[in-house]
Image (cartoon, grey):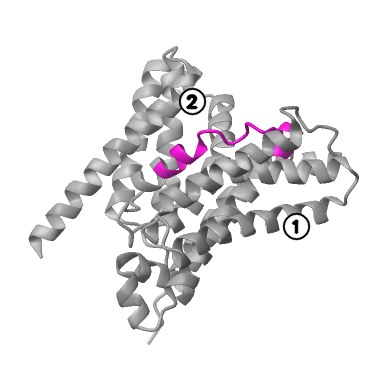
């Protein structure tokens, strides 16, 4: 007998999102024409969502665990400041990146320890981390930009491979990798069990605390990767980078099928959620809306997604 190939699951939610994205794209293409579907506009949309895709994938891990991480934007900014300041002082590019990613993992692990070991609510723990790191960014830079970065580092975010921006290739490759290991790795499968029922998972031999720490560490690690792409693209570090990004990350993950109650989520859906949020924001700007409404739009989309999630959960409970 031939072995069946394992594939990344495509849920009904993902199919629905694909249809919605196609409809939005088709309707706006008819209304706005080449202004919308031009290569320049589409390239800008996908280039900008590279950061959101990484943060939303990280947020998916945390939501699967039944938690939330409000610190991802601040982790992005802080890691970016750390790396650019090290580079500014002449440190080797590879070593600066390794140190920056290590800082990201440490921040996430601290979040995980506080949540799992000290039973602090994820909202409170990550809110404290968000404020601490954002404040540290301004203390380290005094509000100024960190510039003077080496060309080899800037090329990471500004470079192209086969005509495609490096940051798009990197973010999509990471999303696909996470989608594969989330279905094949025993460690990542345990996150779903912990998210569904941490006590039952513990009784079955799963270390809930270790799994939660890993999830938060992964979330911050991806924020660190986003920091590398952003600072290299803009050729500078800035204390305000990542402000409000956590809202878009949560919105995209929940729209993609992650449940605020834990135990559900997939990276294909998250990617589609990121695309939908980016498209809606781009459409709003196309109709002369202010870019400053981006966070408000993401919040409204999150509210709608959570409402549907609650309705789905209640129906599921009634059918049991």
Q: Is residue 44 left or right of residue 237?
A: left
| Residue 248 magenta | yes
Q: At which x and y percent is residue 31? A: 37, 17
Density class for disc 2 (Cα within 10 Å; few <14, some 14-19, many ≥20) is: some
Magenta stretch bounds: 231-250
Farthest bottom residue in view: 1
Asked which quadrant contains residue 60, the reply is bottom left
Viewer-nearest residue: 231 or 177: 231
Q: How many marks?
A: 2
Q: Quadrant of the C terminus?
A: bottom left
Q: Earlier in the sequence, mark 2 or mark 1?
A: 2
Q: Nearer the viewer, mark 2 or mark 1?
A: 1
* Quadrant of the rendering where the N terminus is positioned: bottom left
> Which residue carries the number 2 mark?
37
Asked if labels 1 and 2 touch by Cβ distance under 8 angstroms, the answer is: no
Q: Residues within 10 Å of mark 1 (few under 14, many from 20)?
A: few
From the viewer's side, name the closer residue of 168 and 193.
193
| Residue at screen point 63% across, 37% down | 135
- Residue at x 52%, y 41% (from the top left corner): 52
Asked if 269 appears above or below 8 in the picture, the reply is above
Residue 274 locus on image (x, y percent):
45, 41
Q: Which residue is at 76% across, 46% downward?
A: 83
Q: Eyeballing the image, is 299 above or below 82?
A: above
Residue sitting nearer the eye, 186 or 14: 186
Q: Is residue 161 magenta?
A: no
Q: Position of residue 56 (x, y in %)?
A: 48, 47
- Dividing the picture into quarters, in which one does residue 265 lie? bottom left
**Residue 293: image location, x then y, percent:** 44, 21
Answer whether residue 71 is visible to the viewer in this image. Answer: no
Helix, strand or loop at disc 2?
helix
Circle 1 sits on which residue? 98
């Amino acid at each position: 007998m031939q072995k069946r190939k394992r594939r990344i699951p495509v849920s009904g939610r993902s199919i629905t999102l694909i249809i919605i994205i196609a409809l939005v794209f088709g309707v706006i293409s008819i209304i706005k024409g080449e202004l919308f579907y031009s290569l320049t506009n589409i390239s800008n949309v996908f280039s900008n969502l590279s950061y959101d895709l990484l943060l939303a994938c990280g947020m998916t891990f945390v939501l699967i665990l039944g938690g939330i991480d409000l610190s991802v934007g601040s982790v992005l900014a802080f890691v970016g400041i750390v790396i650019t300041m090290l580079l500014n002082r002449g440190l080797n590019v590879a070593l600066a990146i390794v140190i920056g990613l290590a800082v990201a993992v440490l921040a996430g692990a601290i979040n995980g320890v506080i949540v799992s070991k000290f039973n602090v609510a994820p909202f409170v723990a990550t809110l404290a981390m968000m404020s601490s790191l954002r404040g540290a960014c301004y203390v380290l830079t005094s509000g100024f930009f960190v510039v003077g970065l080496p060309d080899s580092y800037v090329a990471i975010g500004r470079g192209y491979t086969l005509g495609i921006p490096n940051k798009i290739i990197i973010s999509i490759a990471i999303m696909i990798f996470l989608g594969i290991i989330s279905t094949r790795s025993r460690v990542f499968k345990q996150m779903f069990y912990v998210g569904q029922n941490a006590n039952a998972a513990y009784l079955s031999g799963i270390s809930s605390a270790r799994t939660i720490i890993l999830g938060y560490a992964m979330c911050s690690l991806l924020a660190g990767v986003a920091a590398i792409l952003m600072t290299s693209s803009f050729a500078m570090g800035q204390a305000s980078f990542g402000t409000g990004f956590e809202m878009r990350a949560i919105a995209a993950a929940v729209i993609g099928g992650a449940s605020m109650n834990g135990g559900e989520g997939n990276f294909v859906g998250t990617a589609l959620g990121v695309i939908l949020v980016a498209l809606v924001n781009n459409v709003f700007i196309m109709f002369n809306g202010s870019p400053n409404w981006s966070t408000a739009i993401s919040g409204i989309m999150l509210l709608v997604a959570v409402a549907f999630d609650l309705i789905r959960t209640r129906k599921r409970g009634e059918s049991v």
